[in-house]
Every structure is written in structure tokens, then in C-alpha cells.
Image: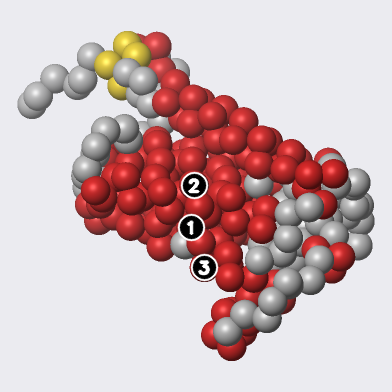
Amino acid sequence: MPDAPATVPVLPVLRSRRGKYAAALLVALACAALYVVPGQWALERAQVIGLSAWEQRIPWIPQTVWPYLAQYPLLITAYACCSDLRRCSRFLYAALFAQAIAAACFIALPLRYPREAFAAAALPDPATAAVAAWVRAMDAPVNCLPSLHVTSCLFCMLLLGRGGGAWRLAGHAVALSSMASTLTFKQHYAIDLLAGAAVAILAWSIAGALLRERPRSAWTAQDQPMSAGS
């Protein structure tokens, strides 16, 4: 029988491709619940705060619904294309930690973005108009601070990693444009973006620390003999 590994992380690491997708589904469901419940709670309680002068000058551009929605295929693609199971594990844990932190913030400080104060400078094409109307109907202007759109996009960039390559550069470009679209699609205050970035860095760091290898005896009691009376 092979010896048990001398070191183990605090949290379990994905071990197979099948487990990678099963875990992603569970995390997605948990994150959805942590987003929807505070959002419903905040609908009648959320407060509007003042926009800075430069934010007021940012027009509502309905066409930016497309980069706004690009976050979702980017999440799926970046995760599916990552073959490093430890990095995928870190991504899932960080996403769950960030969502939990954000849920607490949404309840403690419920904010609503005054998007009704903005009108499009020019009517978009029918397809864009329909999609923009659908997104606005589905995504209420609450759950503002922190911006989980920014958090998710930064996680994608961290998952993709640094370096060249057309695919990696394209992914980073999509992530950056999706983050910027939260302002032009009138879903977030500027401070939400900064808060989202801070939460992403914090959650990614926590996940990395908990996945770092440590001496096995420090985190499990499995190697210790049980007493006769146990």
C-alpha cells in the first residue's frame, strides 16, 4: 500500500475532469442562491447614492449589453480550457468565497443603481434593444457593491494566467470590456468596480492559501491512533 502523502492542502483539490464539472455545477448553484436571496431582500430596502460628476457624464449605451453578457461564455470557456486541476480548484473556491462575502455586503449595505435616470442617445437595432430590455428585466439594479461582474472577470483573467498567445490575450480583452460595460450599461457605481476587484483579490488569496500544501499531521487526525475508549 502506498504511503499517504506527507503534505496535504486544507481544502480538497479536484482529481478528475468529471469531478471538475460536477464541482463547477454545485458551486454555480450555490452562487446563484447567494445572489438571488440578497437581491430579493434588497428590492424594497436598497438605497440610491449620489453619482460623481464624471459618472453622470457616462451615457447609457445599450449596445454594451453584448460585452456585458460576454462574461458568461468567458467564464465557461476559461474554466473548460484550463487543464490545471489545482488552478480550477482555486477558481471554484475563490468564486464561492467571493459570492459569500458579496452576499454579506449586499445585506449590510443594500444599494440600488438609478438606471432609470439614463436614456439611450440613439435607439439600438431591434435585436440589441430586445436583449437589453430582457437583461434589465432579469437583472434588477441591486446587489451593487461589490460588483460580482468585475470579480468574475478578474477570476477569468487569473484562471487564464499571464503570457502571450492569441487566446489568452483575447480572453483578457473580453474580460476588460465586460468590466467596463458595467458602467455604460448602467448596472454599477464606479465604487462597485473597485470593491469587486478588492473582493476578487481577497477571495483568490484565501483560496490559494487554503490550497497550499502543509504537513499532513497538522490538518488531519487520520494518522493519529484512536484510543481504546473512542
Amino acid marked by disc 3 = Trp
Q: Which residue is mark 3?
A: 66
Label number found at residue 176: 2
Say which residue appears at 64% left-offset and 70% top-offset. Answer: 62
Determine the residue located farthest toward the left in the rendered image: 1
Q: Earlier in the sequence, mark 2 or mark 1?
A: 1
Label number found at residue 71: 1
Q: Earlier in the sequence, mark 3 or mark 1?
A: 3
Q: How many marks?
A: 3
Quadrant of the rendering where the C terminus is positioned: top left
Q: In the picture provided, is 167 more to the left or to the right than 230?
A: left
- Give the image quarter of residue 139: bottom right
Circles 3 and 1, Cβ within 8 Å, touching? The answer is no
In whole angstroms, how far apart are the C-alphas of marks 2 and 1? 10 Å
Say which residue appears at 24% left-offset and 37% top-offset. Answer: 164
Q: Earlier in the sequence, mark 3 or mark 2?
A: 3
Viewer-nearest of discs 2 and 1: 2
Q: Does residue 210 appear in this view? A: no
Q: Could you say where residue 141 lies in the image, as x and y percent from the top left?
A: 77, 61
Q: In the picture provided, is 196 more to the left or to the right than 222?
A: right
In whole angstroms, how far apart are the C-alphas of marks 3 and 1? 9 Å
Amino acid marked by disc 2 = Leu
Seen in the picture, residue 7 relative to 109 is either above or below; the reply is above
Quadrant of the rendering where the N terminus is positioned: top left
Circles 2 and 1, Cβ within 8 Å, touching? The answer is no
